[in-house]
Image (cartoon, rainbow, N blue to C red):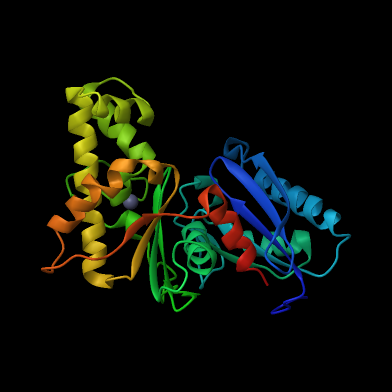
Amino acid sequence: MSENNEMAYKVGIDLGGTKIECILLNNKNEEVWRKRVLTEQEKGYSAILEKIWSIYNDAVLQIDNKDHTLGIGIPGIISNITGVIKNSNTLCLNKKPFKQDIVHMVKHDINIQNDANCFTYAEAKLGAGVNKNLVFGVIMGTGCGGGISINGNIHLGIQGIAGEWGHMQINPEGPECYCGKKGCVETYISGGGLQRLFENRFGTRKTIQEIILGFRNGNPSCREIFLGFLESFGIALSNLINILDPDIVVLGGGLSNIDELYTIGKDEVKKNIFSDRFETPIVKNMLGDSSGVLGAALIGI
Ligand SMILES: [Zn+2]
């Protein structure tokens, strides 16, 4: 086993709702190899385990099974009491003894962390949050998650839920969330949330891209929904900043590419900040799509 072995290779696996990605790093954190497969969560939990086992074997084959660390990022949290997954929007993972099952298959120690924590850790170590003491990482993709890095370490919290702002309620009368509550941040400022808000309001479906382009071209219905989205972003993020006052906020996930988040969105945050000055940098991630899988590799044991 290779805990704290700086000479070892690092295998990182990012388990997402749509894809499973694996990366192999050398001891200088340089990428040696990478592979992606579809998660196909509709095939169920056992099929996901088999895919992880297969992609892990592909990775260690590249290095003739030499000494390596292993880390996995998951959508959800490993309960520190029961050891099973909770709070995952990839629903077939919930209540499953994922860690035990993976260790049993791969016969290697493993560190498993929430995907937003992996993202935040990678950005704090190698990306936009380098040299910042308190980094709040946000993932706005299919869902909405977050992680907190303090002095280069992930802050997990007593329940392991630190940074999980996606299920902070911003409207008790809002849309229903898979978690059982209504009006969670995730129902407003995730990709799925944005599309559902449009559909519920106007009865037709539009892609996120269509809504954004519609807004930019002055389409009134797109404008209403998209400005509402930016307003919700401002409310949710200002609540967070008012509590945590981080040195930087790093945005990741597909929605982090929306330019208006850094202009109109930032102004919406400023409106709700409990301070006469607002200097918190709100920036796009530096590691792009790779931050999750890089973080998984970096947390490995
Ligand atoms: Zn929720």
Quadrant of the snapshot with the N terminus: bottom right
Q: Position of residue 272 (x, y in %)?
A: 14, 58
- List the single residue furthest toward the right: 64
Q: Is residue 99 above or below residue 258?
A: below
Q: Is residue 180 above or below residue 158?
A: above
> For the point 13% across and 56% down, which residue is it?
271
Quadrant of the snapshot with the C terminus: bottom right
In front of the other: 19 or 88? 19
Q: Is residue 181 above or below residue 207?
A: below
> For the point 22% across and 33% down, which residue is it?
225
- List the single residue furthest toward the left: 276
> For the point 40% across and 42% down, which residue is it?
257
Q: Position of residue 50 (x, y in %)?
A: 73, 47
- List the single residue furthest toward the top: 204
Seen in the image, is 123 located left or right of residue 23? Answer: left
Q: Position of residue 15 (x, y in %)?
A: 59, 50
Seen in the image, is 200 located left or right of residue 254? Answer: left
Q: Position of residue 30 (x, y in %)?
A: 69, 61
Seen in the image, is 100 located left or right of residue 9? Answer: left
> For the point 79% across and 65% down, which residue is it?
107
In front of the other: 251 or 18? 251
Residue 204 visible? The answer is yes
Tell me which corner region of the image, top left, top right, bottom left or bottom right, holds residue 219: top left
Residue 187 visible? The answer is no
